[in-house]
Image (cartoon, rainbow, N blue to C red):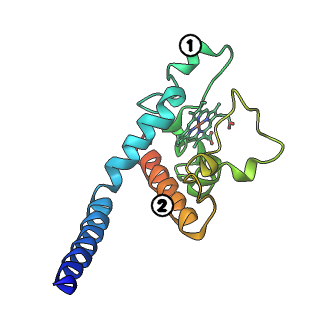
Amino acid sequence: MWLGACTIVIVSVICCLFVGSASAQTSAPSSAKKDFVLHCADCHGVDGKGNGPAVQVIPGFKPVDLTNLSKNHEGQFPRQDVYDIIDGRKRLPGHYDSDTDMPLWGLMFQPEGREFSKEAEEKVKARLSALVNYVEGIQQK
Ligand code: HEC
């Protein structure tokens, strides 16, 4: 009886894990879009052109137009640079101006209480890479 109940619980947990990871995979592009709208659009604008609402609020604040990165790099999307800038840790310690500068997403996306564990780093990396793909997808031709 006990064994039966346990088996059911275990099987359903395993099922959930599978279903969960499968849907996480298929929803990757839209979750990057969600991340972008949620975390980047304030400054860079929903369209990425650098006209988010923060521009009106902070004087002299000009987040870059993210749609012409390829154009500015001879047609080549600067993938690694973009990743490093979004992650932000390479900008430490000197370049971080806490209010107006670009947030350090490699730190912001760390899960609370499990920061910098191997698992957390993998998740952060996947999330940042998805954002890089998203930014690559909005490049002007
Ligand atoms: C608080 C406002 C703010 C937010 C939010 C923000 N950024 Fe930025 N971002 C900036 C500013 C300002 C710059 C330019 C100055 C700098 O490089 O620090 C910048 C620069 C960049 C660059 C470098 C562009 C280049 O010219 O090489 C990329 C890529 C970028 N942001 C992507 C993102 C992404 C992706 C997000 C969301 C995860 C995001 N930003 C969120 C303000 C912001």
Dividing the picture into quadrants, the one containing residue 121 is bottom right
Label 1 CA crowd tier, 10 Å (few <14, some 14–19, many 20+): few
For mark 2, give the secondary structure. Answer: helix
Residue 50 lies, in percent from the top left, at: 53, 27
Please state if 22 lies on the left or on the right of 98 as rendered: left
Q: Nearer the viewer, residue 121 or 140?
A: 121
Q: Residue at x 56, y 20 (%)?
A: 54
Q: Are marks 2 and 1 in contact (CB under 8 Å)?
A: no
Q: Is residue 61 visible?
A: yes
Q: Nearer the viewer, residue 75 or 106?
A: 106
For mark 1, give the secondary structure. Answer: helix
Label 2 CA crowd tier, 10 Å (few <14, some 14–19, many 20+): some
Residue 106 lies, in percent from the top left, at: 61, 51
Q: Write down the residue under mark 2.
A: 126
Q: Residue at x 27, y 66 (%)?
A: 22
Q: Nearer the viewer, residue 136 or 111?
A: 111
Name the residue furthest right. Answer: 94
Image quadrant of ligand 1? top right
Q: Nearer the viewer, residue 116 or 32?
A: 116
What kind of residue is marked 2? Ala
- Quadrant location, the C terminus: top left
- Above or below — where is 16 with respect to 78? below
- Above or below — where is 20 with respect to 128? below
Q: Write down the residue under mark 1.
A: 56
- Quadrant location, the N terminus: bottom left
Residue 19 lies, in percent from the top left, at: 24, 67
What kind of residue is marked 1? Gln
Q: How many marks?
A: 2
Residue 129 lies, in percent from the top left, at: 49, 57
- Which of the marked residues, 2 or 1, is nearer the chain's N terminus? 1
Give how far apart the Cα atoms at labels 2 and 1 are: 32 Å
